[in-house]
Structure formats: structure tokens, C-alpha cells
Image (cartoon, rainbow, N blue to C red):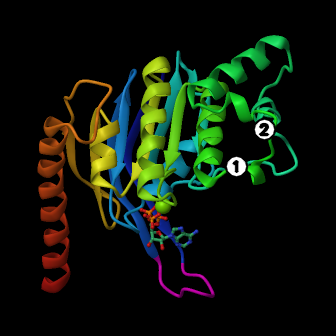
Amino acid sequence: MATVLIENLTKIYPPTATYPHRVQALGGVNMSVTGNVFVAVLGPSGSGKTTLLNIVAGVETPTSGSVRAVHNGVPAQVGYVFQEPRLLPWRTVLNNMLYVQDRKSDRSRREAEFYLTMVGLNEVAHLYPSQLSAGMQQRVGIARAFLVNPDLLLMDEPFSHMDALTGRSLREYLQRVWLHTRKTALFVTHDVSEAVELADRILMLRPGGVVFDDIPIDLPRPRNPDDPAVRAVERDVLRRFDSMEAAVRFGAQAQ
Ligand SMILES: Nc1ncnc2c1ncn2[C@@H]1O[C@H](COP(=O)(O)OP(=O)(O)OP(=O)(O)O)[C@@H](O)[C@H]1O
Ligand SMILES: [Mg+2]
């Protein structure tokens, strides 16, 4: 479990040959996340979600401000689930799992099989990625991220390329694995119902990369998207999201 502390974080991309304007991706983000919590970062396209996650992961540098992701006083070990599964096509499912392990011991094999079973894939451990559907490949991506036993799990819209039914079942699998491990998680999405189904807390980002709202989601787990209580919270968050978009539109017109 990790603590993530973000203070006055800004990111400005300088003009490039292909896009001659500077872009403010993050405009002073403050947030703190600690413990066994699942936090969704919810925002429309271009609101800086991926930039934020990449800075937390350390693969992007901030323009100003500070980010600390620590576990027991040392930098947190981070696991990342991408929008696409990013499996190695020449390795079997099991070997894609074991590839991220330092030790190829019987124990790591058993752990890999445990997480594959959690996402319902142990039967296909010997197959190659091209023999799996996109949803199954993403299930491997999820299992692999948990297998490395990260202190902090970062996920960037891992279900956004999936059809609705596949996305629904993937969310169910993710809930199941997360409930087993309760890793500190930052999950980026532009989908309100996904955020409500998965998160303990929703940080809403507005374009320009500013936190617009910070909403606790106090619903029992596991959550069923058809549960009226889940639906009611979803409607409330959707209203807030709409009011943010209206505020952004109004602000844009006023300029
Ligand atoms: N490498 C880059 N160089 C220049 N501008 C960038 C770069 N990466 C992102 N941007 C710009 O920064 C802003 C935020 O982008 P980012 O990808 O973080 O948003 P996002 O919320 O993840 O969007 P999406 O939901 O579409 O994935 C956008 O205006 C984007 O065009
Ligand atoms: Mg993105």
C-alpha cells in the first residue's frame, strides 16, 4: 500500500513542429491518496489524466510542483495497466506473466496461475495472445499487473477499447482481484459509471488539468452496476460531471 502526495503539479507541453502552441495539460493539481483505496481520476478527453498518471509513474517529468509516491518511506513500486494489453506476441499467456517476475521459481509460477485463475484464464495459460479475444488479453494485463505485487497500481482507461459487455465483465474481474489485494490504485477513466462501480473516491479533472471535485463513494463491495443504490450515486456523479462541463463551456464562451 502506498501514499501518493501531489502538490501544485503543473505540466506544460512546449510548442512542437506539428503543433505550434503550448498546451497546459495540468494546471496545479493537489491531491493526496493513502492506504488501501481505489481512486478513480475522472475527466473528459484532454483533461490531463494520462499526463498525471505518467508523472506519478515517473515516465514524464512535471513542469513544476512535486509528486511523491512512497511505501514505507521508500519510492513505491508501481504496476501499470495500459489502454491496450501490450502482451508479447511470441510468448504464451503464462510466459507473459512470468516475464515480469525476477525469479522463475515454482512459487512465481504458482502465483501467476493464481492470478490467471482469478481472471478466469488458467485454462488458456498455454495459448498465445493472438489466440485470445481482446477482453481476454486485457484480463492477462490485469493479472500481470497484480502479479508483480506493486505498492501502487496505475491504470489508464484499461477498458475503453472494449465493447460494453466485455467492459462490464472486465470490471467484475478487476473488482474481484482488487478486493483480494486491496492495492492502492489510481484508475483513469472518462466513464462515470465505471468510476462509480470501482472507486472509493472520484477525483474529477476539468480541461486544463485542474481538480474540479473530490467525491467519496461509499457503497458496499462487490458492486453490481444494476444495483439501484449504485445507479443513484451514478446519477449524482453524472450531474456533477455535467455541471463541470457546463461551467467549462460557459467559461470558454465568456473569454
Ligand atoms: N507529448 C505531448 N506533447 C504535446 N501535447 C501533449 C502531449 N501529451 C498530451 N498532450 C496534450 O496535453 C493535454 C492532456 O493530454 P492527456 O493525454 O494527458 O489527456 P487525457 O485526459 O488522458 O485525454 P484522453 O481521455 O483523450 O486520453 C491534451 O491537450 C493533449 O493534446
Ligand atoms: Mg489519456
Q: Per the image, is 18 magenta?
A: yes
Q: Report the amino acid beneath label 2.
A: Asn
What range is drawn magenta here?
Answer: 15-22
Pick whichever, 26 or 220, lies toward us: 220
Label 2: element kind: helix
Please report whichever mark, 2 or 1, sits nearer to the chain's N-terminal start: 2
Crowd around label 1: few <14 · some 14–19 · many ≥20 (10 Å):
some
At a point 80% along the width and 48% down the height, the residue shown is 88
Q: CA distance from mark 2 to mark 1?
A: 13 Å
Image position, residue 132 (x, y; %) = 70, 49
Q: Per the image, is 208 magenta?
A: no
Query: Total number of numbered labels?
Result: 2
Give the vertical position of 165 relative to 127 (above or below).
below
Give the vertical position of 154 relative to 37 (above or below).
below
Crowd around label 2: few <14 · some 14–19 · many ≥20 (10 Å):
many
Residue at label 2? 96
Residue at label 1? 132
Image position, residue 20 (x, y; %) = 53, 88
- Check whether the beta carbons of the residues at disc 2 and disc 1 lie within 8 A of each other: no
Q: In this image, 191 relative to 81: left or right?
A: left
Pick whichever, 251 or 80, lies toward us: 80
At a point 32% along the width and 58% down the height, the residue shown is 43
Q: Nearer the viewer, mark 2 or mark 1?
A: 1
Image position, residue 175 (x, y; %) = 42, 31
Pick whichever, 71 or 241, lies toward us: 241
Label 1: element kind: loop
At a point 79% along the width and 19% down the height, the residue shown is 109
